[in-house]
Amino acid sequence: MNNNGSNNVLDEVISLSKIDWKLFPCCYIENSKCSCGQSHEGNTSAGKHPLISHWHETATSDLTQLKEWFNKIQAPNIGIHCKASGLIVLDIDPRNGGDESFAKLENLLAGEIPITAIALTGEYQVKGKKVRGRHIYFKDCDADFVKNLDKFDLPGIDIKHNGYVIAPTSSHLSGVKYEWVDGMNPSEIGVSPLSPELKNIICKKSGTNTSSKENHARIQTDVIVDATPAALRELERQVQRITSNSKQGNRNNSLNEAAFILGQYVGGGQIGFIEAQDALINAARIAFSGDNAEEEIQLVLRADGGGFQAGASTPIYPLQFGKEQFKVSWILDGVKDDEVLKFFGKVNLKELWLDETVETWLVPDFICEMRGHVIYAEPGIGKSLIVREVCACLASGKGVFGQSKREPMSILYIDHENIPTTDIRRSLIDMGFNAEELEEHFHLLSFPDFAPFDVPQGGAELMKVVSILKPKLVVMDTASRTVQGKENDNNTWLDFYNYTGKLLKAAGIAYIRIDHTGKNADAGQRGGSAKKGDVDLVWYLKEIKKETVFLFENQKHRVPIEKLQFAVKRELLPLRHSLEDALDWRALANSFAKHELATEIIGEFLEKNPSHPRGIAKLYAAIKEQLLANGISKRQFESAQKELFNPSSENDSLNQ
């Protein structure tokens, strides 16, 4: 350890004043007591309270004033006014679990805590070992901060910003002196700004309980911004929503919600406040009426304290597709043309022709590496169950659908629908899996609080998780739960691809969106046509035999596959799905369809003729022509009739 080469308090004061930190003198420790003479029993302020009044106003970096203060007293402690010095300080207290919490924080942020100035504080006995507290210094970022990280289950980490901290060379009640960690003196390495990841945790979010407007982002009303395509699309959506919603009871809520959503884009620098405000004002004037309409509109859409400002506190930033530092450097430093083109992915065609790489399948002819997939079906037939088993097999190395084993791979399963303690755990146990074989590679996120994947922040959050878990496959169950846009709006899925799908594919990661059919199952998956456009393979799962046999039909493939359909059989003891290639599934599917049609014809006839006998002979005679016209045999009719009415005996049926 070092103390800037000296234990002299004035030397440290001079050093810190040179970097414009605002300082003031505090009491010090003498003979294991505070110099003020008070006992300070029951609190930790000994050697820490100011020796001057109004310290928050008079703290200074003026060396003349500092010398006058510090020369009057022999070795006083040094106070640093954090906010006035442009500092945020993380105070790590090992007595309250601070060391363990900071290790968790480092793991949570995957190392995204910048190297910066660090000081050691008091010395304590914790679990039989001597440990030191720490002050970790960062630059202020003009924001409001939480007081501690308790709500993140990270006890022992306090955030010092509006108050002060004690500087190195000062004396501590534990008998040690505050000191800079070797090589971590601010005069040597400076003080780093917060990383975006750390800032996102320690800054107050919109909705924090406070009455102060200062807790919201300040909107700059005079800034001209070239709106991004994503912001303009969102602006158009909100304008359409406002103009079509003129009900008196809903209009204020709708306008507030629109202001909040667009405020997020304003806060992220994607659109100017005036452009967004003017568009919503004009839309509201169409929808609102009455004597006080204009007053209501102006009140809701104000810059200070309204929905815009609340939204700006949780900004949505534009997606950065390139390394901005590199882009600037090629303009300023003259990077060679071929390096610029290589940076933007120019393909060498000669090398491409020599590359004989073929598609790699995670599951042969079903799930392809590095590709986007959709698996959809009617509600309630167990599509998630099948995909969950596939993922568990891939993660554990077991064969999918009874096929040959392979090396385990990392799988990320994002679930917004199933309860883990019952639905998921129970099904995986029924499939024969245990926690030990899934723990390493099967990563389940249950009801995660991601931003929507059709906005930049959502894609960035997912990619952060991906960088930690490094999955080969990401599953999203269910697709509609992962986006904020409307399902039938093609822009929703264009945005999903730009902000999430494209990033996954560029990183070499396959993904599956699990989805539902619309009201008419024959019309395909619900939502806009772009839902198919951004993926490489689309599989439609349909039930062939109730709860036991299912058919996967391929409706789109950008990669060559041998089979456009295959069937799986569901067994219950144990719960598993296996391929059933030995049967003629086309014939089975056709037979099942005929059975269903026969049931419909019988039902429609009896609805029109409720008193008609329901026995096989008389009922068949009545609808024989319609059955034959639809290619339905008498045996198929009899099967449908028995399932519907289950007569007690064949004779009873014939005599009805």
Image: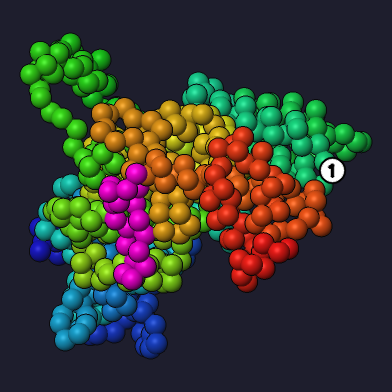
- The residue identified by callout 1 is 248
Q: Could you say which is closer to the camera, residue 614 or residue 511?
A: 614
| Residue 480 seen from this side | no
Identify which residue is drawn at 24% across, 85% down.
Answer: 32
| Residue 129 seen from this side | yes
- Decide whether the magenta segment is chiefly helix, strand or loop: strand
Colour theme: rainbow
Task: Identify the residue at the far top of this view.
Answer: 337
Where is residue 262? Give x, y as percent: 59, 36
Q: Could you say which is closer to the camera, residue 180 or residue 350?
A: 350
Where is residue 228? Give x, y as percent: 49, 25
Q: Quadrant of residue 173?
A: bottom left
Identify which residue is drawn at 20% across, 55% down.
Answer: 399
Label 1: element kind: loop
Q: Quadrant of residue 119?
A: bottom left
Where is residue 180? Give x, y as percent: 18, 60
Q: Quadrant of residue 295?
A: top right
Task: Find the magenta span and give its range.
Answer: 567-584
Identify which residue is drawn at 42% across, 46% down.
Answer: 588
**Quadrant housing the C terminus:** bottom right
Q: Residues within 10 Å of mark 1 (few under 14, many from 20)?
A: few
* Residue 311 inside the magenta-drawn segment: no
Q: Could you say which is closer to the camera, residue 29 or residue 236?
A: 236
Q: Could you say which is closer to the camera, residue 20 or residue 403?
A: 403
* Residue 569 inside the magenta-drawn segment: yes
Vertical comparison of 441 with 130: above or below: above
Identify which residue is drawn at 10% across, 24% down.
Answer: 356
**Quadrant housing the N terminus:** bottom left
Where is residue 167? Give x, y as percent: 27, 62
Please name the amino acid that badge 1 sits on: Gln
Vertical comparison of 490 with 193: above or below: above
